């Protein structure tokens, strides 16, 4: 995976002749009926990203104190309301705006 995302790789230069690398900075694996598999993803490292992630989790846990089991808002999720924003997800065979599985 890492060689395929390296634009300076000799293999990539030969195969693609200066085109973009095969793998983009963020890799999320979609399945037939959902936009992402929570067990298969990889993100480009970025200064401060870990601290931002820790803060997002802390904010969600604080908000969840007022919720019943499973202590997670299906509307607000991790801080972005996909339904309210009108976001659509795309899997490999399906797409839609229903954000619960």
Image: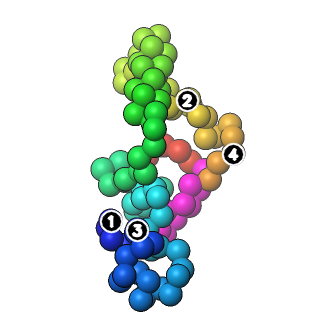
Q: Nearer the viewer, residue 66 or 8?
A: 8
Label 2 to label 3: alpha-carbon separation: 30 Å
In the image, which is nearer the foreground, mark 2 or mark 1? 1
Q: Nearer the viewer, residue 24 or 18?
A: 18
Label 2 to label 1: alpha-carbon separation: 31 Å
Q: Which residue is mark 1?
A: 2
| Left or right: where 73 falls relative to 69 | right
Residue depicted at 52% across the width and 74% down the height: 20
Is residue 25 rendered magenta in the image?
no
Compare marks 2 and 1 and give the one earlier in the sequence: 1
Q: Residues within 10 Å of mark 4 (few under 14, many from 20)?
A: few
Asked if disc 1 and disc 3 are in contact, CB closer than 8 Å, the reply is yes
Asked if disc 4 and disc 1 are in contact, CB closer than 8 Å, the reply is no
Q: Which residue is mark 3?
A: 5
Q: Which mark is residue 86?
A: 4
Callout 3 secondary element: helix
Q: Which residue is mark 2?
A: 79
For the N terminus, the quadrant is: bottom left
Q: What span is colored magenta in the figure?
A: 89-97
Indicate the position of residue 13 as horizontal and vertical percent values: 44, 83
Residue 76 in sight? yes
In the image, which is nearer the foreground, mark 4 or mark 1? 1
Q: Residues within 10 Å of mark 3 (few under 14, many from 20)?
A: some
Callout 1 secondary element: loop
Callout 4 secondary element: loop
């Amino acid at each position: 995976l890492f060689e395929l995302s390296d634009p300076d790789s000799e293999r990539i230069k030969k195969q693609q002749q200066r085109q973009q690398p095969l793998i983009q900075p963020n890799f999320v694996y979609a399945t037939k009926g959902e936009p992402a598999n929570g067990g298969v993803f990889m993100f480009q490292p970025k200064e401060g990203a870990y601290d931002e992630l820790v803060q997002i989790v802390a904010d969600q846990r604080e908000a969840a104190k007022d919720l019943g089991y499973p202590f997670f808002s299906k509307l607000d999720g991790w801080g972005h309301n996909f339904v309210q924003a009108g976001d659509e997800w795309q899997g490999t065979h399906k797409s839609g705006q229903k954000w619960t599985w």
